[in-house]
Image: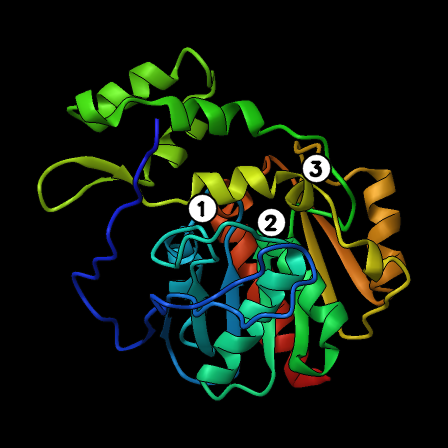
Amino acid sequence: MRIRPCPSRWPWRPRSWTAPSRTCSCRASPGADVAPCALFARSQGHGPPVLLLHGLFGAAHHWHDIARRLAPRGEIVTADLRNHGRSPHMPHMDYAAMADDVLALLDARGIERASIVGHSMGGKVAMAMALRAPDRVSRLAVVDIAPVAYPDRYGELIRAAQALDLRTLRSRAQADARLAAHIAQPALRAMLLQNLRPDPQGVWCWRIGWAGILASLQALCGFPNDLAGAHGGMPALFVKGGVSDHVDGAGEQAILAHFPQAQIVSLAGAGHWVQAEQPDALARLLAGFLFEAAALA
């Protein structure tokens, strides 16, 4: 069954925002030489620019609480990555393409250099950007991910979401009940279902590009081979969840191989969703690293 994406609808325009292009072209295959796509983004605050990037199946609003806490210290930009949120749905996505998207976003906003913070997939985008364009990244903060390949944990989940019959769907609760047979974790289902919205006619539709994500899953689980020997000399902070399995000993070695100045911190009691499970501790860590440490440098 073909699931059509939600039409782009922006019920409000934040004070500072970038609307996605509806005609942008993206990579048809890894390494294709085409223009990046324009990402939906919003910003708050004034001062040193900081860009926050969400993880797979997420959206910019997942950083809302952290962004609010950081805004008194800088210009905090949150963006929807391609195939997520209000940004365009594309047939392909890899870390080179997504890093290009983010660089284009900075260009569009007149930001020469910024601190980049990314969680999970967004952390890999941030790392790829830092290694490909180190002159554009003043500081790098990565949350619970390493520059290594991970096993595919999401293919079955995506196919279950694609198979959901939206024509007979009456509520998000009904969708949750149908997905429960395939996705056992209630928190994960709740996050996925944030991407399910009714259109103006009341028909439920996905605001996430499942087809493009599924077609690119191998690239998203991995890390670019052409960056194997690349090094980033900027200050770097890596925060891992104390009860998460995403950054193990091999992951820490890979982090330090790419980012020799990296500081690796574990937050006790946090799983993979650090910004949701330990927002106070994470906000304090990020504020200290992004603003206080930067002032002393």
Residue 205 lies, in percent from the top left, at 26, 38
Q: Residues within 10 Å of mark 2 (few under 14, many from 20)?
A: many
Q: Is residue 177 left or right of residue 120?
A: left
Measured in 3D between alpha carbons, the distance from the residue under mark 2 to the one under mark 1, in whole angstroms, is 9 Å
Q: Quadrant of residue 202?
A: top left
Which of label 3 and label 2 is nearer to you? 2
Task: Say which residue label 3 marks.
Answer: 246
Q: Quadrant of residue 80?
A: bottom left
Residue 289 lies, in percent from the top left, at 64, 69
Q: What sort of colour scheme is used for the picture?
A: rainbow
SS assignment at label 2: helix
Measured in 3D between alpha carbons, the distance from the residue under mark 3 to the one under mark 2, in whole angstroms, is 12 Å
Residue 104 lies, in percent from the top left, at 52, 77
Task: Say which residue label 1 marks.
Answer: 58
Q: Is residue 35 left or right of residue 32?
A: left
Name the amino acid, label 1.
Answer: Gly
Name the amino acid, label 2.
Answer: Met
Q: Residue at x 87, y 41 (%)?
A: 250
Task: Say which residue label 2 marks.
Answer: 121
Q: Are marks 2 and 1 in contact (CB under 8 Å)?
A: yes
Which of label 1 and label 3 is nearer to you? 1
Nearer-the-camera pick, 277 or 219 = 219
